[in-house]
Amino acid sequence: MISILNKYKNPILIITILFFVGSLGFVGAGVFMEEYGPNAAIAKVDGESIKYKDFLRNFDLLSQEARNQEDFDENSEKALRQQVLQSMITQLSLAQAAQRFGIGVSDLEIGYAIKSAPVFNVGGGFNKDAYIWVVRNQFHMNPAEYEAQLKREKLASKFQNALILAAKVTPQEEKLLKEETDKALAKEKKGKKASKKEKESAEAALSLATVQLKAQDLLAAYSDKINADNKIRIFKKD
């Protein structure tokens, strides 16, 4: 699943949170909206709707590049649809979690992100007309919708970062990491003494890998909690 997104990624669409891809197993093969119409909900997360029109917009953005690939077939399209919906559900779940934990995104943050984005800059500075044109004609949203999506992205990112920061290496783990580093270096150097720089570099790499694994475990545990709470509803046409 990750390989599909890597292959068909679009830098404009920031909806994929890779730690969760594959851990949320609640999207079926055939996904349909409950009612026909752009404002119909394709899914609900804790009572908050994901609109079918937003799903289609995100899917269309990602599929534009994908359709140019020779091996993009019906199965690839179906898998990409599932990935897009999974990503949207994941992002909304994380944004909701951020709000429950008191994490917020200010209007100042949103304004700064918009004004500093190169795509909205003309002649070396932010251009309001360019902002409105790009949002409407390239992102296919109105400014209010775009800013709401940007807020969700930032909330989700902040909560994800909070979980990652919580994945710290304990003193016991640090001791074990140093021991494992010494063993690995001794084997690699074949009896020769490793330099201080080599030892520090190896310890840092092993420590980072440990933190990443712990962060993935925390995020996976949170995704399991989402499933267990049964707060996600995906509408399918019978």
Image: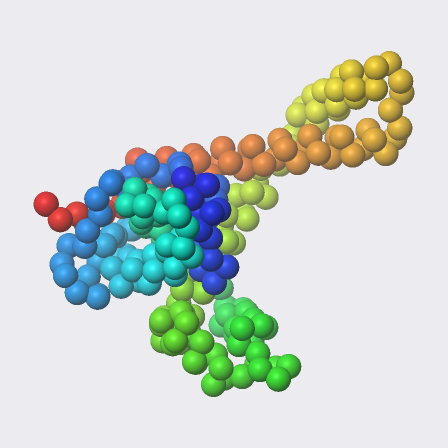
Please give the name of the residue rendered at 23% of the width and 54% of the height, measured from the top-left corner. 42
In this rendering, position of residue 191 left or right of residue 231: right
Snapshot quadrant of residue 226: top left
Snapshot quadrant of residue 41: bottom left
For residue 68, above or below residue 107? above
**Residue toward you, 13 or 94:** 13
For residue 22, above or below residue 70? above
Question: Number of numbered discs present?
Answer: 0
In this rendering, position of residue 195 left or right of residue 107: right
Please state, as top left, top right, bottom left or bottom right, where the C terminus lies in the image.
top left
Please state, as top left, top right, bottom left or bottom right, where the N terminus lies in the image.
top left
In this rendering, position of residue 168 left or right of residue 38: right
Image coords of residue 31 (percent x, y): 22, 47
For residue 119, above or below residue 157? below
Image coords of residue 219 (percent x, y): 47, 39
Image coords of residue 96 (percent x, y): 38, 53
**Residue toward you, 112 or 8:** 8
**Residue at the top extreme of this rendering:** 191
Colour setting: rainbow
In this rendering, position of residue 119 left or right of residue 20: right
Image coords of residue 187 (percent x, y): 78, 16
Residue 156 visible at all: no
